[in-house]
Image (cartoon, grey):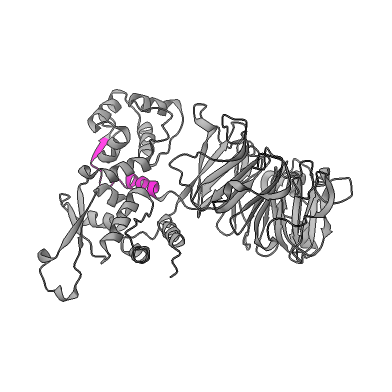
Amino acid sequence: MEKNVEVIIFGDDRHSYLQTDKTETNFISVIKVHKPNKIVTGDGTHFLVWKGSNKLEFYSQSQGNHKFELEGEKIVDIVSGCESYLIPTESGKLYSVAQGRNHYSQNPTTNPESSKFSEIRLVEFFSRKNLLIKAIGMGYGSNYFLCTDGSLYVSGSYQSGRLGISKQRNQQVPLLLTQNVERVFSGPHGLGFFYITKSKILFGCGYNAYGQLGLGINDTKTTPKEVKLPPFQIEDLLDMYTGQTHSIALTNKGKVYTCGSGKMNGHNENKNKFACLQFFQDKFVVRIASAENTQLALTRDSGLYCWGLNNTTLNEISTWTIPTKLKVPKYFKVSAISTKINCGTKVVFLYNTIGNCLRQDFVNLLKSGKFTDTSIGSSENAVKCHKLLIELRTGLKINVIQQIMKDNNFTKEQINVFLKWVYSDEISYNNAIQGVFNSLNIAFPINKDNTLENTLLKLYEDEDSKDFNILVKIDDDDDNDDDDEEDEEEEEIPVHKLILMARSGLFREMFENIQEMGNNSVRDYSHKSIESLEVLIKYFYTNKIELTADDDPQLIVEELEDSIEYYQLNQDSNFKIELQKIKAQFNLKF
């Protein structure tokens, strides 16, 4: 089943694609995007999505939304500047989505108003010279083009030395800067750049008033200068970014190194040389992101940390001078494996490369109209649903909800939006829907603890309400195949029938074939250990695979992998990612 993923946007109401209700804390916006490979944003009022191998979608309130498809090409990356995007392909060609002259290397007389992100164009300069693009760096009005032959070209604004050339003019047509380059780094709002030569030497160039180039000095450099004796091995570098007054680097050892302004570098003191960020000394950082004045770090234990100016996170204090754990909606699962982070001007984008399978499963159960046992709304507007989930989310008995719905004559549209919240936490913020919640005496905006995940966790812990049993055979001796089933020793795993129907294709099919729903148990024929099945059942409720100290990780992972087909979990990519996390946690290899 195809999934949508949610993109969580932190920012103020001037720098967010969607403006949320003023009562919502942190001005969090939530949008849904269908199966993105990568999402990047420029100034925060627009963003670009890469989907599939060659498809792009551009979103903007002011410029409109546009879809592009590069026929015969395979995209390898998308990179954002402040007002433009560059797209390198597997064939070595380079494309742009931008406005007017920002389309790079087009005819310099191009009318700036000729294209407002409405088309994708080939950057002809490199094609004419038969140069193949290897990687891209984009800064604040500056661009860095690394070709497969090691040549590094630059274009854009020359100010503050950010192009590394002596010419005091903007460079619209790309200009060759140097040769024998292996990697190039910048940031969407950086005033400088770094590159690594094939001989493993790191160079920096650009604005350096705060020492953000790590050169040991605070003078702006209009030509590249070697970063001598950095505190990390050049071969270990995974990623680097430049900002307005800081730079940040991540190594494959999970260590973060920063320099520049003490307000932005996480050290709380100025640094004109790269220094290891001690805050993460006991943590392993797997991913970083950086923008104008904001930095993010994601750790292996799925902690997400932010530091810099609060015009992204809107915290009560003016600046986070040291990394601080970023609060995200509880229903948004931060994962060291699947969560992606991207920064724009005064805005942070968070998204997972997979959808929330748990919520999607419940939405699909609602849409199917199967196994419903009640309805809400007046007779002409009645919508079928599931009593247990409705009562759990609202804390009200179903007859009370039905009466309130009838008394207020809620429309079918209002009821359906209410049910979307019940089954997936999705809410449309408008006065009409707010009236539904107010009538049901549910706090609006919804309390951040009132999530589907928290509801299901309480359900998992509530033994009294479980209405179904999975019977697991304990003695699996083949010599007893002729014995009566009644003589087999079995253990019961109590569950909720609703959970099984929502989460497993096997149980959905089984319940569809049962004529009398009065059956309250079923035998498991997967031949897996009871320990593995208990882990699987808890996953159905929590979307997490969690082991106890007594569990055998090797056995459970093997059995759960073998159970994917049996329980029809093939489309649940989150289940596979959870298995990968257990493998990494226990260093399992098979």
Residue 579 x %, y %: 41, 60
For the point 46% across and 28% down, the residue is 430
Q: Is residue 84 visible?
A: no
Left or right relative to 248: residue 51? left
Left or right relative to 497: residue 589? right
Which of the two residues, 288 or 338, is positioned nearer the viewer here?
288
Q: Give, as a single range, the part of the protein colored magenta.
A: 358-375
Residue 567 x %, y %: 31, 60
Which of the two residues, 451 or 120, is positioned nearer the viewer here?
451
Quadrant in the picture for residue 46: top right
Q: Quadrant of the C terminus?
A: bottom left
For the point 53% across and 45% down, the residue is 304
Name above or below for residue 56 compared with residue 580.
above
Which of the two residues, 505 or 575, is positioned nearer the viewer here?
575
Residue 262 x %, y %: 69, 39
Q: Quadrant of the N terminus?
A: bottom left
The verdict on residue 370 being magenta is yes
Residue 103 x %, y %: 74, 49
Question: Which residue is most to the bottom?
Answer: 479
Q: Is residue 294 visible?
A: yes
Quadrant in the picture for residue 52: bottom right
The number of discs equals 0
The verdict on residue 588 being magenta is no
Left or right relative to 458: residue 254? right
Quadrant in the picture for residue 129: bottom right
* Magenta-drawn stretch, dominant element (helix, strand or loop): helix
Name above or below for residue 348 compared with residue 249.
above
